[in-house]
Amino acid sequence: MEAVAKLRNVPMSARKMRMVVDTIRGKSVEDALNILKYTKREAGEWLEKLVLSAVANWEYKQDMVFSADDYDLVIKTAFVDEGSMLKRFRPAPHGRAHRIRKRMNHVTLIVENRIATEELEAVEEETKTEE
């Protein structure tokens, strides 16, 4: 079972966010939270909230019956896309104008459990007995 969490319109360039996302991709949720907690980059704070949101989404999807601590959640997929861009102009020498682009990004995080939940195991057993 997997759960998705998305963070949209983060006021930071996608390149800066990708540097931190690459460090947590494929890691367990506990390891990822430890990495993000001690990362010096601003992206760490944003991603820490997103990982916690993905875990909460996973628990909610399980009807709040299972705790995420018991099922070894892993960050299955994490990717960063470019978002919209605020465009501004700043005065430059000789009466010219330089363009300033304030970039944004969208982060998508998918979390899944490595240990199967009891409900899934029960359904698998039922289908095996029917066959």
Image (cartoon, rainbow, N blue to C red):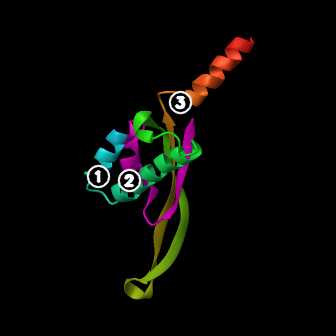
Camera-side mark, 3 or 1? 3
Identify the mark at residue 115; answer none if there is no mark. none
Quarter of the figure that contains the C terminus: top right
Identify the mark at residue 117; answer none if there is no mark. 3
Q: Is residue 94 magenta?
A: no
Q: Are marks 2 and 1 in contact (CB under 8 Å)?
A: yes
How many numbered badges does the structure rendering display? 3
Quarter of the figure that contains the N terminus: top right
Identify the mark at residue 48; answer none if there is no mark. 2
Question: Could you say which quadrant of the image residue 16 lies in?
Answer: bottom left
Determine the secondary structure under disc 3: loop
Q: Which residue is mark 1?
A: 37
Q: Amino acid at mark 3?
A: Thr
Q: Amino acid at mark 2?
A: Glu
State the residue in front, 127 or 44.
127
Ranked by sequence position, the earlier of labels 2 and 3 is: 2
Over which residues does the magenta segment extend? 1-29
Neighbor class of circle 2 (other Cα within 10 Å; few <14, some 14-19, many 20+) is: some
- CA distance for labels 3 and 1: 28 Å
Ranked by sequence position, the earlier of labels 3 and 1 is: 1
Ranked by sequence position, the earlier of labels 2 and 1 is: 1
